[in-house]
Image (spheres, rainbow, N blue to C red):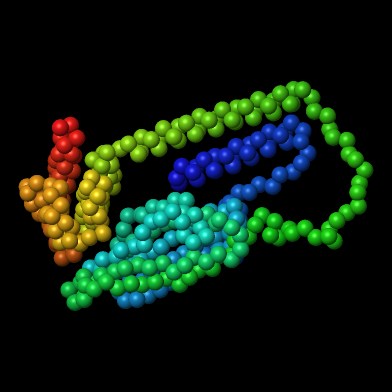
């Protein structure tokens, strides 16, 4: 969850705690809780209902799922894009943005790719917030794919999801006021007296919650600043550390090489601006050669690393344990050498 969403949820809990404190001090007015989880509509088995679009264009299956089916304006929706392709088919998923029609994108992440037999499963998970009530439409989403199998045409193809209509209601949608519900005036009621002890307790609780909010926002700001000041090398080392500790090289060597080359490509993009993750190996190496960002030795090392990884990812080569260790060392050496070069240029 991102910074803004965390602050919003924290404030909600703070307000709820203050309401409970006010009730303990003698307030008689009831307040309705707005817990998002309670708004999920479920079937007879207790499973939330899902809006779903499923499209098939061989050799690709594209599914879009949105839950809850009928959210309230205060709810956050979870939208999951799932792409299933046969081995050897390369997929380019939709780019991440800040909004999607009448929905704000509050959070986004991509789980690690999975294998289901010979089928590769790739996902994107969005957290959406509706900007208004009514019938809102999630426009069709497009995925581009290349059939790079031995008998494939290797030409760009597209598969598109169906539009999804989401009906967003308000808190009072089912309790709209009516003139028939009006009642005659009643005699004034005396409010219960509250002692000074209860009032002081309520004021103290409010001050404590405001202090906690200030501390929370300060900590979140410090964490955000630290994340934004990390160098491309530091980010790459963090990704390599997570990859090594996941033990993916022993469980699924092909997916391990996909993730390992992804770390190197993202490092190059952050360091040079070259859009490495969106290019084939041949296109990427050609651009690196013409951009003069790296020396000939670094270009040769990078070419050997990427081409050996392609043999595992696309040609079905089964790497040995020493091959996996050697590829990891090549990635570490390239990331370290590139960072030293950048540091040297800055300090001249």
Residue at coordinates 88% horizontally, 54% vertically from top-left? Answer: 183
Nearer to us in this view, 70 or 163: 163
Residue at coordinates 56% horizontally, 28% vertically from top-left? Answer: 211
Nearer to us in this view, 45 or 34: 34
Q: Where in the figure is residue 294, as x and y percent of width and height?
A: 13, 47
Residue at coordinates 74% horizontally, 26% vertically from top-left? Answer: 198
Q: How many numbered circles are shown?
A: 0
- Hey, which residue is sitting farthest right in the picture? 187
Quick check: can you spot residue 95? yes
Say whether residue 253 is left or right of residue 98: left
Nearer to us in this view, 177 or 87: 177
Q: Where in the figure is residue 204, as x and y percent of width and height?
A: 65, 25
Q: Where in the figure is residue 332, as x and y percent of width and height?
A: 17, 43
Residue at coordinates 38% horizontally, 56% vertically from top-left? Answer: 96
Quick check: can you spot residue 319? no
Say whether residue 122 is left or right of residue 165: left
Instruction: Assign the C terminus to one quadrant of the image.
Output: top left
Q: Where in the figure is residue 168, as x and y percent of width and height?
A: 59, 61
Nearer to us in this view, 33 or 117: 33
């Amino acid at each position: 969850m991102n910074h803004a969403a965390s602050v919003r949820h924290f404030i909600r809990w703070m307000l709820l705690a203050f309401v409970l404190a006010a009730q303990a001090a003698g307030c008689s007015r009831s307040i309705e809780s707005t817990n998002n989880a309670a708004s999920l509509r479920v079937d007879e088995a207790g499973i939330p209902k899902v809006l779903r679009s499923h499209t098939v264009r061989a050799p690709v299956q594209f599914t879009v799922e949105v839950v809850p089916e009928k959210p309230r304006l205060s709810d956050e929706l979870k939208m999951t894009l799932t792409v299933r392709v046969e081995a050897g088919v390369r997929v380019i998923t939709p780019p991440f943005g800040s909004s999607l029609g009448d929905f704000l994108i509050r959070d986004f992440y991509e789980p690690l790719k999975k294998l289901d037999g010979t089928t590769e499963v790739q996902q994107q998970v969005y957290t959406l917030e509706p900007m208004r009530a009514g019938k809102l439409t999630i426009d069709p989403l497009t995925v581009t794919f290349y059939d790079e199998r031995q008998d494939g045409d290797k030409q760009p193809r597209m598969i598109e999801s169906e539009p999804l209509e989401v009906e967003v209601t308000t808190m009072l949608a089912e309790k709209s006021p009516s003139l028939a519900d009006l009642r005659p005036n009643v005699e004034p009621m005396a409010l219960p007296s509250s002692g000074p002890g209860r009032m002081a307790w309520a004021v103290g609780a409010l001050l404590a919650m405001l202090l906690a909010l200030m501390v929370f926002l300060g900590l979140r700001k410090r964490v955000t600043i630290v994340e934004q000041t990390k160098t491309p090398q530091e980010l790459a080392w963090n990704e390599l550390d997570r990859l090594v500790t996941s033990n993916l090289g022993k469980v699924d060597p092909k997916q391990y090489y996909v993730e390992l080359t992804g770390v190197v490509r993202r490092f190059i993009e952050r360091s040079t601006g070259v859009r490495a993750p969106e290019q084939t190996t041949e296109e990427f190496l050609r651009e690196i050669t013409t951009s003069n960002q790296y020396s000939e030795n670094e270009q040769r090392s990078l070419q050997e690393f990427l081409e050996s990884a392609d043999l595992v990812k696309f040609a079905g080569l089964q790497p040995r344990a020493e091959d996996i260790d050697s590829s990891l060392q090549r990635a570490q050496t390239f990331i370290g050498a590139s960072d030293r070069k950048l540091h040297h240029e800055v300090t001249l």
